[in-house]
Image (cartoon, rainbow, N blue to C red):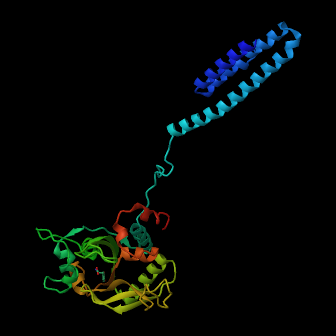
Amino acid sequence: MKEKLELVENSFRQALAVTSDTKGLEALKVKYLGKKGELSGFMRLLKDIPNDQKAAAGQMINRIKKSFQGQLDDRREELKKVEFEKQMDSEWIDITLDPLQTHAGSLHPVSLVQQRLERIFESMGFQVLDGPHIETEHYNFEALNVPAHHPARDMQDTFYFEDGHLLRTQTSTIQIHGMENLEPPIRIIGPGKVFRCERTDASHDSCFHQLEGMMIDKDISVSHLIHFMRTMLGEIFESDVKVRLRPGYFPFVEPGFELDISCLLCKGKGCSVCKKVGWIELLGCGMVHPNVLRAGNIDPSIYSGFAFGMGLDRLAMMKYGITDIRPLHGGNLNFMRRFATSS
Ligand code: DAH
């Protein structure tokens, strides 16, 4: 029996060495240690051997059984590790990759302020007009009281087409289209893109956005202008904004003003944003020049009006605390998403 057991031990050892997965190990366990396995067969033979050898033979079979069990357990641990490694290699994923997310689009900060302004003015009886980006000199300059020789043309250099058309430098062009197409009383705003031959820096770009406004009726005065500006600014900045008018020159208004608001960051005390003066220059405005009314077929002896124009990029920058105009037109979606929930 001893020699036979040694043969079984040898064949077990060899079989174990070539088993390469845990499934194979289970089969080996059944073959050697199972109820109908090799070692159980030897146990059954014990009854046939002489009594004085029985105990020693029984102990020997039990020792081999334990040894097989131990070896199977050790090998199982080894193989489990190998199988785990294999699985890791085949199911490898890069968890540092940006997940494939779909982002819902959101409105650009300039569109946000534009829409907000449109709602504010519509609630005050103004209608929103659109105008062409490509204009004639007549609409961009002459009808706005800037004849060909006028030095104000230098301040608004633009891109000219060979046929004499140009990219509009200001939304004031919409005033003329509005007066031509509507009858007084007129309350209009005209938002849109404008273009200038500018060197780009933190506060200038060759394309930016303006919103123009105009009100024409009988007996319109500067107090109407101040009322509408104050109402509009209070709504947009959601606080009671202090307003001041300084004389300012624009060929299409007389008198003309620069409108400043008290600095929202320091509440007028003076800070680096308002350059220590407590006021921020926001828009140009004034009483519509009689020549401009005439260019729009409106009789200045019957009607008067006010007009204003402001930069929407500048307004968006102030409202959202953006210090450089360039990312506004840079197309970086991560930058844009910061304003996704703002209104
Ligand atoms: N069009 C002017 C500009 O681009 C802004 C402006 C000033 C518009 C005064 C107006 C106004 O309607 O009355 O600088």
Query: Is residue 310 placed above or below 33 in the rendered structure?
Result: below
In this rendering, position of residue 118 left or right of residue 143: right
What residue do we see at 42% from left, 71% from top? 113
Q: Quadrant of residue 305?
A: bottom left
Q: Quadrant of residue 52?
A: top right
In this rendering, position of residue 142 left or right of residue 302: left
Measured as percent of width and height from the top left, residue 304 is found at 30, 85
Quadrant of picture, ligand 1: bottom left
In this rendering, position of residue 35 left or right of residue 76: right
Identify the image quadrant of the N terminus: top right
Q: Given the current orientation, which residue lies at the most extreme right position? A: 51
Most foreground residue, 161 or 244:
161
Measured as percent of width and height from the top left, residue 111 is found at 39, 67
Most foreground residue, 288 or 334:
334
Query: Is residue 103 placed above or below 304 in the rendered structure?
Result: above
Q: Given the current orientation, which residue lies at the most extreme top position? A: 48
Q: Quadrant of residue 306?
A: bottom left
Say if residue 145 shows up in the picture: no
Most foreground residue, 285 or 43:
43
Most foreground residue, 342 or 26:
26
Measured as percent of width and height from the top left, residue 146 is found at 19, 83
What residue do we see at 17% from left, 76% from top? 138
Say if residue 148 shows up in the picture: yes
Measured as percent of width and height from the top left, residue 18 is found at 58, 24
